[in-house]
Image: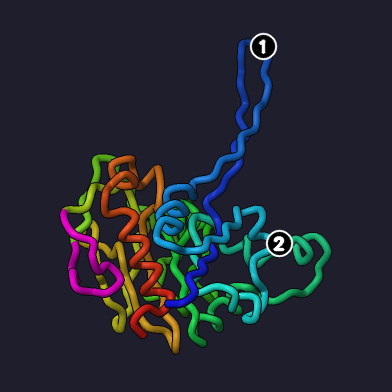
Amino acid sequence: MTRKSVLIAGESWTVHSIHQKGFDSFTTTEYAEGVRWLRQALEDGGWQVTYQPAHVAATDFPSTVEELNAYDCVIISDVGANTFLLHPETFTKSVPLPDRLAVLRDWVHGGGGVIMVGGYLTFQGIDAKARYAGSAIEDALPVTMHPYDDRAERPAGVTPAVQLPEHPAIRGVTGPWPDLLGYNVVRPRPEADVVVTVDADPLVVAWEYGRGRGLAFTSDCGPHWAPPAFVDWAGYAPLWQQMVSWTAGEGR
């Protein structure tokens, strides 16, 4: 590949806390991002990373195929469908704007690559609030989603099992994988390759969609489902570098 450009959307959050001390209380607000492990892994692999935190993606995520053509791969991680469907101009002013998930689907079909990473607000997520089931981008993914809360919490840890060690999406990733603490439960499409499983459910699923490619990684790219042993694992960076390279069209 001569160009290596990836867009990551999501992996940020704001926490409002209420501190109650007897009669009195006060509030604090904290903003945080969980992208650093994934971002560093890709930059170390020579990728040019554009990162849009959730609040930035709400306004700046590409709304045309032409804008998406600036990238080789798009990663959606832990940010719900509403962020892409409800641009602030549409939500507050009733301005009609493109369905950005449909635009992303069409871009993948034409030759782009998309990865959905698991979390509380991807796939269906906690209380089914991520709401990707039935959205346009589901068409481009190698899995279908349940209409309900799809989390599988595994607080004691569960070990991934490689099913297709020669699949190019994980080429070069060797040795045992560290445990994960949870994932989203999805259904692989019959045409897709289930590359890695976890507790008999899909963890890494890949397929060709039109002239493009889609990949699902159903657990986190960082804490909390991906604990320190996973993000510090020697295979972490090669795994993400290879999954992104394959999804972006390597070897096509």
Figure quadrant of residue 251: bottom left
Q: Is residue 180 left or right of residue 62?
A: left
* Quarter location, residue 207: bottom left
Residue 91 part of the magenta-drawn span: no
Indicate the colouring scheme: rainbow
Q: Residues within 10 Å of mark 2 (few under 14, many from 20)?
A: some
Depth check: 11 or 243 in front? 243
Residue at horizontal 30 percent and vertical 84 percent from the top: 191
Left or right: residue 206 versus residue 108 is left
Q: Is residue 239 above or below residue 167?
A: above
Mark 1: which amino acid? Phe
Point out residue 99 in the picture as x, y percentages from the top left corner.
65, 75
Quadrant of the drawing holding the N terminus: bottom left
> Which residue is more in the foreground, 41 or 16?
41
What's the distance in space between the residues labelled 2 and 1, CA to CA?
41 Å
Task: Reply above or below: 32 against 203.
Answer: above
Give the overall secondary structure of the magenta segment: loop
Q: Residue at x 63, y 73 (%)?
A: 100
Q: 189 and 1: which one is in front?
A: 1
Q: In the rendering, at what x and y percent does residue 61 appear?
A: 64, 66
Residue 220, horizontal then vertical, whole percent = 39, 52
Q: Which residue is farthest right?
A: 93
In front: mark 2 or mark 1? 2
Secondary structure beneath label 2: helix
User: Is residue 88 shown to the viewer in this render?
Assistant: yes
Which residue bears the numbered disc 2? 59
Amino acid carrying label 2: it is: Thr
The residue at the point 24 percent across, 44 percent down is 157
Q: Nearer the viewer, residue 82 or 11?
A: 11
Residue 23: which disc? 1
Specify the segment rendered in magenta: 162-175
